[in-house]
């Protein structure tokens, strides 16, 4: 087989491990070759690609980011005939199967291509851990560790200055990162998209905590956290990407100012932003990404197209793309209830 690969959407620790694993698995048998499209679907549309070999994928396992580059290009944007454009490139490159590695948007394109008869096998990627069809996505554990390290560092400076420290982390639709890292780092309040919050209640909670003796607090807030209507004004961005997603940001800044006003405690905000995506993947993500890459190539060899690889329990299995993308995987309520026991 001749197999095409691409990485789409936001970058993520572990992408290079997937690329390496697909190539290594394929080259374990004679006759397979690989093409990597640069910058996600943009590379497919522009026929911008590079041959992937044993040599070119050597040494990339611990590297963050993606050697292929990525983008948020949508082949179907503004009514474009994405099927025709992608098919043309695949025919020209004599591609027998395509393995896109990405989140809901990248794999959403893959599903549309599959429904049009193009052979695809999806690999789920998102640090937010909010994709269905898999218990966990690679990159998530790395992001959680980065945020946990940041909380640990904020504890010492918060206590030294008697401050409320607000830490804004990624999580557009779900609070997996905020809750896992907040629980691991001992946060005093965690605000997530699944649980709209009242800033007055958060302020009252912090005042009660300080009345008991502690002179500082750590508040972790996901970028997509939603204030109850009328309780907090946040910046509303108007810019959207090719998939129609608004650019988030600002909840941490708004929360910092309002908490200081309501509590009279000096407050500071830290926005980790893309720091959470960067750097070398932790061991768990390297192993999971490697297993996903091997499984994706196995599926392609077996002709099991229209599927997405995923982790269920300890086993890597296949789930139809349509089923995996049906709805996002939101935060487990029981996990949040556990975290609430330690607030304050």
Image (spheres, rainbow, N blue to C red):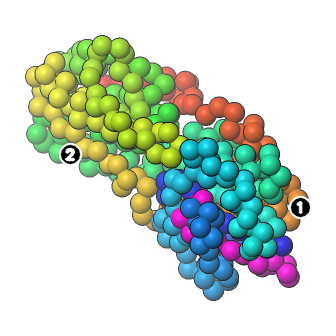
- Camera-side residue: 4 or 304? 4
Can you tell which quarter of the image residue 159 is in?
A: top left
Can you tell which quarter of the image residue 293 is in?
A: bottom right
Residue drawn at x 23%, y 35% is: 253
Quadrant where the C terminus sits is top left
- Camera-side residue: 28 or 219? 28
Considering only vertical position in the picture, is 178 above or below 67? above
Residue drawn at x 50%, y 46% is: 242
Residue neighbourhood size for the residue with mark 1, other residues' Cα within 10 Å, grouped as few (<14), some (14–19), many (≥20) = few
Nearer the camera: disc 2 or disc 1? 1
Q: Is residue 59 magenta?
A: no
Numbered tag placed on residue 156 in the rendering: 2
Q: Position of residue 36 (x, y in %)?
A: 64, 72
- Residues in magenta, as a range: 25-41
Q: Position of residue 283 (x, y in %)?
A: 55, 62
Residue drawn at x 22%, y 39% is: 269
Considering only vertical position in the picture, is 166 above or below 314? above
Q: Count up the numbered dots.
A: 2
Q: Position of residue 93 (x, y in %)?
A: 74, 74
- The residue singled out by tag 1 in the image is 302
Which comes before the other along the chain, label 2 or label 1?
A: 2
Q: Is residue 86 left or right of residue 317?
A: left
Considering only vertical position in the picture, is 272 above or below 3? above
Residue neighbourhood size for the residue with mark 2, other residues' Cα within 10 Å, grouped as few (<14), some (14–19), many (≥20) = few
- Camera-side residue: 167 or 108? 108
CA gap between label 2 and label 1 equals 54 Å
Q: Position of residue 110 (x, y in %)?
A: 70, 51
Quadrant where the N terminus sits is bottom right
Numbered tag placed on residue 91 in the rendering: none
Residue drawn at x 62%, y 78% is: 50
């Amino acid at each position: 087989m001749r197999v095409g690969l691409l990485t789409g959407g936001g970058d993520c620790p572990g992408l290079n491990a997937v690329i390496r694993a697909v190539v290594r698995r394929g080259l374990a048998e004679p006759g397979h070759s690989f093409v990597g499209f640069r910058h996600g679907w943009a590379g497919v549309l522009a026929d911008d690609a590079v041959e992937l070999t044993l040599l070119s994928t050597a040494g990339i396992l611990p590297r963050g980011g993606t050697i292929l580059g990525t983008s948020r290009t949508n082949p179907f944007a503004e009514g474009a005939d994405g099927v025709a454009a992608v098919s043309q490139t695949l025919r020209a490159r004599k591609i027998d199967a395509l393995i896109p590695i990405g989140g809901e948007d990248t794999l959403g394109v893959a599903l549309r291509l599959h429904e049009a008869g193009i052979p695809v096998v999806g690999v789920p990627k998102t640090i937010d851990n909010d994709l269905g069809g898999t218990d966990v996505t690679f990159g998530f554990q790395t992001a959680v560790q980065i945020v946990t390290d940041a909380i640990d560092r904020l504890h010492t400076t918060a206590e030294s200055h008697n401050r409320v420290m607000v830490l804004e982390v990624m999580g557009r639709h779900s609070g997996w990162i905020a809750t896992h890292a907040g629980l691991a780092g001992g946060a005093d309040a965690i605000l997530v998209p699944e649980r709209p919050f009242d800033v007055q209640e958060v302020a009252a909670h912090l005042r009660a905590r300080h009345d008991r003796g502690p002179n500082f607090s750590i508040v972790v807030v996901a970028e997509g956290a939603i204030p109850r209507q009328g309780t907090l004004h946040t910046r509303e961005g108007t810019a959207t990407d090719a998939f129609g997603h608004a650019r988030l940001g600002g909840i941490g800044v708004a929360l910092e100012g309002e908490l200081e006003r309501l509590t009279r405690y000096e407050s500071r905000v830290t926005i980790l932003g893309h720091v959470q995506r960067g750097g070398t993947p932790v061991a768990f993500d390297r192993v999971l990404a490697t297993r996903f890459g091997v499984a994706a190539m196995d599926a392609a060899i077996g002709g099991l197209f229209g599927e997405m690889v995923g982790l269920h329990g300890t086993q890597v299995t296949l789930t139809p793309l349509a089923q995996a993308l049906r709805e996002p995987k939101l935060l487990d309520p029981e996990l949040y209830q556990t975290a609430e026991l330690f607030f304050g």
